[in-house]
Amino acid sequence: MKEKVELLQKEVKEKLAEAKDLKETNELKVLYLGKKGPVNELTTYMRGLNVEEKKEFGKIVNELKQELSSAFEEKIKKMEEDILNQKLAKEKVDITLPATKIPVGSPNILEYIIEEVESVFMSMGYDVVDGPEIEEDKYNFEMLNIPKGHPARDAQDTFYIEDETILLRSQTSPVQVRTMLAAGGKNPVRMICPGKTYRRDADDATHSHQFMQIEGLLVDKNISLSDLKGTFDVLAKKLFGENCETRFRPSYYQFTEPSVETDISCFICKGKGCSLCKNSGWITVSGAGLVHPNVLKNCGYDPKEWTGFAFGFGAERLAMLKYGIHDIRTFYQTDLRETTNFDRKEVE
Ligand code: DAH
């Protein structure tokens, strides 16, 4: 009997040593140590033995079982560890590899110019305010001294939404009216309002049916054109450099009197004349003027006591000038080759 046990022990150990992988080892384990395996079978021999022999032989079989079980466990454990180590070696992260560059989004270039203008005016104590893009004719035209049928309306080919009363604002100037009304005719006002505006223009390199204006308004006592000039000077120098000069030319707007076009000296040719300034040495950047007494009155301010100035910039025009963009459509078409070139770092 003992010989049989020793033979079996030898056989199992040999087979176990030859097992190539985990699958084979597990199969061997079931084959030898399973219920119907040869180790269990040994116990059937015990039936014919006497008590003493049973005791002795039982001990031997038990020891064999334990020995083989731990041999299998050890081998299986070792194989599982090897598999895990191989897997870990394969998945090892090389932290010295250069990281992949993930493209990050950046704000539209218009956002930059608006932020710049906002920060200049905020440093002078202006509030930045908002107004509705769907506007009433009353605020967009009438209270700005542009009554129905007035030819000044033709210059702004407007998108009407509901008969002749509700429209997409054609300018940010209605925000002036709303701000003055909210101030109640008693308090000074200093605000700028950047925002979208809409006109029924055919899109081309210099026109867009949707564009952005930056409106400004200051209402206080004893305000004159020289206050407007000084304010405009500060902005021009901040945006286009300390050497930038400014000038006013007479103009006409219904809601300002007198009205002006504001020019900056050409930053390309420094006033000598080039294609950007059409050889004039000057570039027009906004409309402006002193708030018309009728507008002050419409908004609850007594024009004998209060005066003010207002201005309106085209945000795209400022950005086109400052960043050398030649087509206004660039701002509204999501061509990443164009927009990603205007990384803030490159701009500054
Ligand atoms: N709203 C005018 C336009 O769209 C621009 C403008 C001109 C605004 C003069 C003003 C201003 O506030 O004073 O053409």
Image (cartoon, rainbow, N blue to C red):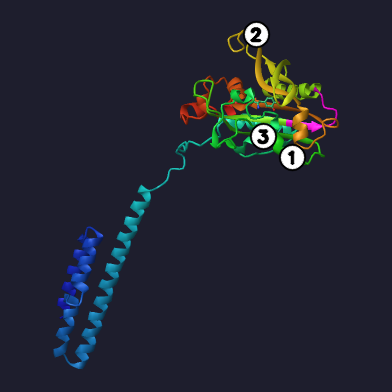
Residue appearing at x 25%, y 80% in the figure = 62
Task: Respond yes or no on whether mark 2 lies under 8 Å from ligand 1.
Answer: no
Q: Nearer the viewer, residue 108 or 172?
A: 172
Magenta segment includes 294: no
Left or right relative to 265: residue 6: left
Q: Position of residue 16 (x, y in %)?
A: 22, 64
Asked if the residue under mark 2 is in contact with the one under mark 3, i.e. CB atoms within 8 Å, the reply is: no
Q: Position of residue 278 (x, y in %)?
A: 60, 9
How many marks can you see?
3
The secondary structure type at the circle numbered 3 is helix
Q: Quadrant of ligand 1?
A: top right
Mark 3 is surrounded, within 10 Å at the Cα level, by few (under 14), some (14 to 19) or many (20 or more) other residues, namely: many
The image quadrant of residue 294 is: top right
Give the residue pinned by disc 1.
Answer: 181
Task: Respond yes or no on whether mark 1 lies under 8 Å from ligand 1.
Answer: no
The image quadrant of residue 149 is: top right
What's the distance in space between the residues labelled 1 and 3, CA to CA?
Answer: 11 Å
Give the residue pinned by disc 2.
Answer: 280
Give the residue pinned by disc 3.
Answer: 174
Left or right relative to 286: residue 227: right
Q: Quadrant of the N terminus?
A: bottom left
Q: Does 214 sit above or below residue 241?
A: below
| Sequence order check, earlier mark of 1 and 2 | 1
Residue appearing at x 30%, y 60% in the figure = 79
| Chain part drawn in magenta | 217-224
Q: Nearer the viewer, residue 212 or 342?
A: 212
Mark 2 is surrounded, within 10 Å at the Cα level, by few (under 14), some (14 to 19) or many (20 or more) other residues, namely: some
Which amino acid does the dot numbered 1 rest on? Leu
The secondary structure type at the circle numbered 2 is loop
Which amino acid does the dot numbered 2 rest on? Ser
- Which numbered dot is residue 278? none
